[in-house]
């Protein structure tokens, strides 16, 4: 069923939602009672008459037409994605209409099939949407092709695109079933994830990367793969970085705790030797850490 366009005079100029309890003030403008009361109690610098009249929300039908036109004319794809970014930035109602119209799947196709510029634009729009769990599951169902594309972007893209890619991966894998995380591909997955963490593109990207590792490391041989990709060394350097905030350090410790279990699980001797060697490299640093119990300090070189 097509969405019904709601006339703009039913929409509150403040909340951009359909008014439940409309009230008209002395300026002749009608608002939802709850919204105008909240505004009046919180604002002291201007009057309701000075509130600019907002654009009416864009309907699902309007967005669907945009997507269909872009599919018919691939050369207009970049322009369409940029228009979607502008629409999404205007209101939460627009974001909901965008997802209902299939924008998430449309942008995923742009990442899979588009050029570098189109991929970057699509990732930028996706990063600003509150993608629902059901839409994330649809993305996961694309036979790992989207994950492959995101890993390539993390390998070759700009810092901004790499950050957006790892944040989208984090969101997707948060709703993934264990089997999906056990068979993560491509082989460069952990190498590129660890590299994003090492480069410290932004605090938001670092936290997304750490959360991604927290989600995937408990499954299959992912701990071993992360260790072999150099995660332990990068995590320790992150812990020693004075500019890292407390939450980032807490997450880094959680991942490091998981990876230290590589020494206890049934892994090959080569992997265990590598893990032990990496930990020994930082033995002197650990000696000065408050994490080490006093009765064990003597075990560390001075």
Image (tube, grey):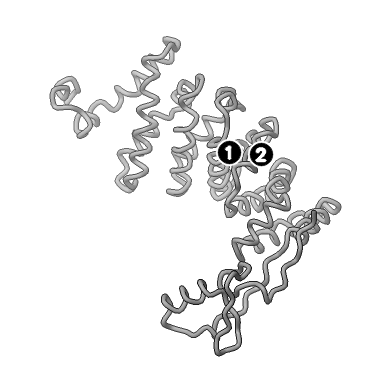
**The C terminus sits in image quarter:** top left
Q: Which residue is mark 1?
A: 172
1 or 2: tag closer to the N-terminus: 2
Q: Residue furthest right?
A: 72
Label 1 and label 2: CA atoms lie apart by 7 Å
Cβ atoms at labels 1 and 2 below 8 Å apart: yes
Relative height, residue 210 to residue 228 (above, below): below
Q: Quadrant of residue 94?
A: bottom right
Relative horizontal placement of residue 279, taking residue 102 as reference (left or right): left
Q: Which residue is mark 2?
A: 139
Residue at 44%, 38% in the rendered image: 198
Relative height, residue 31 to residue 168 (above, below): below
Q: Secondary structure at mark 1?
A: helix
| Image location of residue 120, percent across then percent down | 64, 50
Q: Secondary structure at mark 2?
A: helix
Out of 15 and 235, give the one closest to the viewer: 15
Q: Residues within 10 Å of mark 2 (few under 14, many from 20)?
A: some
| Image location of residue 26, percent across then percent down | 55, 90
Per the rendering, the mark at residue 265 is none
| Image location of residue 237, percent across then percent down | 35, 36
Residue at 40%, 18% in the rendered image: 262
| Image location of residue 193, percent across then percent down | 51, 35
Q: Residues within 10 Å of mark 1 (few under 14, many from 20)?
A: many
Relative horizontal placement of residue 243, taking residue 157 as reference (left or right): left
Q: Residue furthest front?
A: 21
- The number of discs equals 2
Out of 273 and 16, give the one closest to the viewer: 16
Q: Quadrant of residue 284?
A: top left
Relative horizontal placement of residue 199, taking residue 104 as reference (left or right): left
């Amino acid at each position: 069923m097509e969405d019904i366009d709601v006339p703009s005079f039913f929409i509150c100029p403040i909340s951009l939602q359909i008014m439940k309890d409309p009230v008209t003030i002395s300026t002749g403008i009608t608002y939802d009672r709850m919204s105008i009361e909240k505004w009046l109690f919180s604002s002291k610098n201007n009057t309701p008459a000075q509130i600019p009249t907002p654009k009416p929300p864009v309907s699902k039908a309007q967005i669907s037409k945009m997507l269909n036109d872009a599919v018919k004319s691939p050369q207009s794809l970049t322009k369409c994605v940029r228009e979607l970014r502008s629409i999404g930035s205007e209101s939460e109602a627009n974001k909901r209409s965008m997802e209902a119209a299939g924008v998430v799947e449309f942008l995923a196709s742009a990442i899979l099939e588009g050029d570098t510029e189109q991929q970057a634009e699509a990732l930028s729009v996706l990063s600003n949407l509150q993608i629902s769990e059901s839409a994330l599951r649809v993305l996961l169902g694309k036979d790992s092709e989207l994950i492959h594309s995101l890993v390539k972007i993390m390998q070759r893209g700009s810092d901004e695109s790499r950050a957006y890619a790892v944040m989208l991966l984090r969101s997707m894998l948060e709703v993934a079933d264990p089997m999906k995380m056990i068979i993560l591909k491509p082989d460069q997955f952990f190498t590129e994830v660890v590299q994003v963490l090492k480069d410290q593109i932004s605090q938001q990207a670092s936290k997304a990367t750490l959360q991604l590792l927290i989600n995937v490391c408990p499954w299959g041989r992912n701990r071993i793969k992360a260790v072999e990709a150099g995660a332990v060394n990068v995590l320790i350097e992150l812990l020693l970085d004075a500019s890292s905030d407390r939450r980032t350090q807490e997450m880094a410790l959680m991942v490091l705790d998981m990876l230290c279990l590589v020494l206890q699980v049934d892994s090959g001797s080569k992997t265990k030797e590598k893990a032990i060697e990496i930990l020994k490299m930082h033995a002197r640093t650990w000696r000065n850490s408050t994490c080490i119990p006093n009765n064990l300090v003597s075990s560390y070189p001075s």
